[in-house]
Amino acid sequence: MPGAISNSMGNLRVSSDSGVSSSIGQTSGSLFEALDLAVTDSQRDNLVTVGVLGSPRAIKAGWEKFDRSISLQLKHCVEELGETDLKMREQIQHFVESGQQPDATSNDDFVIRLDELNESDTQQTPVSRMHSVIDAACWVLDKAKDHGGNVANVAARTGTIVTVTSLLRDAVAFLVAKMISEDEPPEAVREGLTIALTMIGPALILIGALRDECSATATLKSRLGRVLMSSIFMGSFIAAQLTGATSSMLTAAARVTVYTLSRDIINAFVPLNDNAGAPSNTAVAVSMAGYGAMQFALAELADRMPLHGAARHAAALDYSFFADLLHSVTNGFGAVADDYLLPLCKHWFPISRSVGIESQVNDPESLRKNVLEVTAGLRLANRHQIGNSFFSVTAARTTAFMAIIAVAFAADSLLADSELGEDTQSRVLRVIEAGMLMLIYFPFIFMCSQRTVETPVQLSENITP
């Protein structure tokens, strides 16, 4: 594109002083039309003023100076291009000069839009085709702005909810840890309370399974998700029991319970919706990998941040709202990334290619409509929506997080007797936790894949761990 503009400007140079007046008279219209593509309104007004007041020789010198300045800037732009961009630049330059359409594989959206504009171009001149190129590029940039709006919606909704509920979680964890150290309840009491809290999730899974079967909303995926999540939890809980870690899990179990219940209660009234449809296995797999990697990175970052929650009490430190807020914001960042990554992957990897963007290369109208939309808003949740939240989302989230802390405490108990250094033990625990987070991802999504009994709408609720 830069080369095409430069060549077009170069062709408008005046060759001799004797033909200055006639050449300017013949090309002034097309020259000012070309300037529309390269200068701002204020720059254009200044040039027009010069053209009215200056002599033909001055006008010629002004155009040549302007052309040299533009050519220099465009040369710098071209030098920064990679191989793919250079190939696309050559194709666009060839299109401007001859009208031959660029290769669709280079940038499908841009080429499809350019083809639309070129079909409606009745002039078919280099200048008109250059207008088509710039209009197509602006259309692609407008689509990119949609992603910014989607991210803003996710950040405002998920970021706020997770930050607030994480603050509540850490405050409760600090108080529970303080209560245990002051009252010193017997080990049997602590273990009994831990078991009661950890069984909330599996109990909700069982009730949700019965509810889905009675309402005929259960699907093969939702049944499989409940079975897998329950199996993961039972294996994790048995590991914690065998290593004797159950009695030390009370504070962690309390913080998980408070966090999941408070978060999903708010989520029921402030849903996050998208138009990407149901997730394919590929979309879930890609999102799962991203989720695990993000959580591992955040865990690495957390080790370099001030202690928070119950860890502050264990270190004989006072409660710190700032430390909890710092960790809560970090946790919210990870949740925002996951809440946007899943709909993005659903959009990129649809269940059926017949509804995917790749199948619409020759259908510009469908392509324009197939733009990812992620929205958030308030609603007065009805009984069915609250039931879905508690018996599907809350059940899955609570059970999954309880399984993760059970495995983490069991692994910590085993590592404490090993000869590994403290840093190595921490790194191993983070790897185990990240692995568990990826392990529960598929069952979590599957559990929330019931058959809907509501009137179909354009946007569906987006649910992530």
Image (cartoon, rainbow, N blue to C red):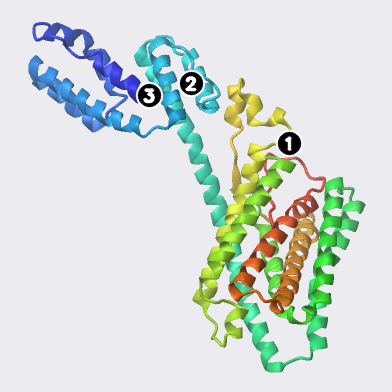
| Three-letter code, disc 1 | Ile
Residue 199: tell me if it is visible: no
Which residue is drawn at the image coordinates 66% and 26% (left, top)?
359
> Pointers 2 and 3 in contact (CB under 8 A)?
no
Q: Mark 3 points at which residue?
A: 1
What element does badge 1 sit on?
loop
Q: How far apart are marks 2 and 3 (CA)?
A: 13 Å
Residue 422: tell me if it is visible: yes
Sequence-earlier tag: 2 or 3: 3
Sequence-earlier tag: 3 or 1: 3
Left or right: where 441 falls relative to 202: left
| Three-letter code, disc 2 | Leu
Q: Mark 2 points at which residue?
A: 114
Which residue is drawn at the image coordinates 14% and 23% (left, top)?
62
Q: Name the residue under label 1.
A: 351
Sequence-earlier tag: 2 or 1: 2
| Three-letter code, disc 3 | Met
The image quarter in which residue 428 lies: bottom right
* Nearer the camera: disc 3 or disc 1: 3
Left or right: where 25 falls relative to 178: left
